[in-house]
Amino acid sequence: MPKIRLAYLMFVVFLVTLACNLPTTAQATATLTPTALQNLGVQEDPAPQQPTGQDLAIEQLVVRYDALQTNGTFGALVCNWGQQASSAFSFELRANGVISSWEYAQPIAAGMCAATYAESMDLPAFGITSPQTVQVSAAIAVTDPNDDSGNHTLQSNLNIQVIKTPASIPGNQYPDQYPLRQDPHEILINVNEYWVLVPTGYESLAHWALWDNQNCISAFVDYLAIAPPAWVAQTYLLDDGLGGGYFAYGAGIFVSTDLELLDYYAGELPRLFNEAREGTCSNAHELTHLILGEPPMPGWLNEGLATYMEDPQRVGNPAYESIECREAGWFGTDFNGDIREVPYEDLMTYDLENIPGIHYYRSGSCFWDYIESTYGRAALQQIVQQLVAASDIKYTGCSVAANDLLLIRDIVNPVVGEDVSPVTLERWGFDVSYHGCEDQGF
């Protein structure tokens, strides 16, 4: 969410999206049985065999900071992709010719990942006292003879950029809105330009957020042909007291505002880690907001683009439901769980008491579907690139002067080479002058 007033709405829409994606009796797919395949002369490939025991793998090497390791140290994410909880293992990490070894005694549940780090050594103990690039290698030794050793080693080049406490991380350009608290109960993990800050107790969630950000940004670069602003890689997952939302805000701050919601995501980690492993971008919606900053764009079209990008046809999570955009409305699962064509909402309105938010979001997303399906991916890319170039990373309110940049008049129409406002007026209720700050609009 780019605006605080919609933080709670984002949480509601997220829950509705989950509900809408539950299987229904109306959703059925035709499949060919193995016998049918054989009759067609097709030999079915055997399904990959998942290990029946534990299957440990080192998935990430990171730089880690907390109140006890203010100079930083090295950490790792170890995942168990098997079907049984893991037994204890030994961990060895080498950097700058220095070795640190420790034991990890806690079992890692099947499908889960766990953070571990060199508690007894900080970066200076590895000979690192200034910013530099360091080759780090790690290995685990397991007691289970059936655990495939193929994923028991990992090597990464880590660019050590910040030798400071979490509270002094640079990049928070608006501390009046979101101060980096002088809080000893926070952990920072860092891989080159990516970093995540979390409360203690949520370190595994931080590793997922870092992994997901890397997947998402790569996908956005491919789809939109755009280099995301540097702040997009900066992630905060904090309890800042705003309550009930999961949203993006200016300055690249990507923040969950409620520990209850953090707990929800922590409970979803087996699913989230598996999606990250498959290269999925699980949080495309909020990353879209971060990439855009505060663009010169009406609110529902802003939300619409974020919804458009989270569709699995673009960069989003395959678990989310795709919708079909038609001339008069979108076809898919509505707020009540019914599969039908839903008429487009008038995007000049903001009536959340009577209109489900998800209907606004999907109506807005169909504007972007219209742009790409009518004028091509290149047109979509050019429009988004211009929006990012004209954006402000801080929300400055809704006052629009007559000479301000307007999305349809000044960006969309010149890119596509014609006036799209007759279509937008008929389908979504706005014309070339729409900026989203009208008294009755959003």
Image (cartoon, helix red, strand yellow):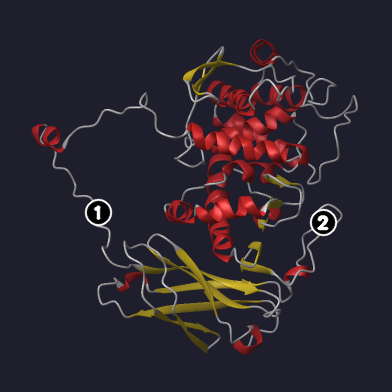
Q: Please state which of residues 298 and 415 is positioned toward the viewer in this rendering.
A: 298
Mark 1 packing: few (<14 Cα in 10 Å), some, or many (20+)?
few
Kindly report the distance in space between the C-alpha atoms of the residues bearing marks 1 and 2: 48 Å
Query: Are discs 1 and 2 less than 8 Å apart at CB?
Result: no
Mark 2 packing: few (<14 Cα in 10 Å), some, or many (20+)?
some
Residue 189 place in picture, x, y as percent = 62, 68
Residue tagged by mark 2? Answer: 173
Residue plotted at (37% across, 69% down):
56
Q: 364 above or below 228? A: above
> Is 161 placed left or right of 77 in the picture?
right
Residue 412 place in picture, x, y as percent = 69, 25
Image quarter (top left, top right, bottom left or bottom right) of the N terminus: top right
* Amino acid at circle 2: Gln
> Is 391 placed left or right of 187 in the picture?
right
Of helix, strand and loop, which one carries label 1?
Answer: loop
Image quarter (top left, top right, bottom left or bottom right) of the C terminus: top right
Q: 163 above or below 242? A: below
Q: 255 above or below 199? A: above
Of helix, strand and loop, which one carries label 2?
Answer: loop
Q: Please state which of residues 4 and 154 is positioned toward the viewer in this rendering.
A: 4
Residue plotted at (58% across, 40% down):
224
Residue plotted at (26% across, 63% down):
52
Q: How many marks?
A: 2
Q: 335 above or below 194? A: above
* Amino acid at circle 1: Pro
Q: Please state which of residues 128 and 304 is positioned toward the viewer in this rendering.
A: 304
Residue plotted at (44% across, 35% down):
22
- Is residue 401 something one can see in this rendering? yes
Q: Which mark is residue 48?
A: 1
Whichever of callouts 1 and 2 sits on the residue coming sooner in the sequence is 1
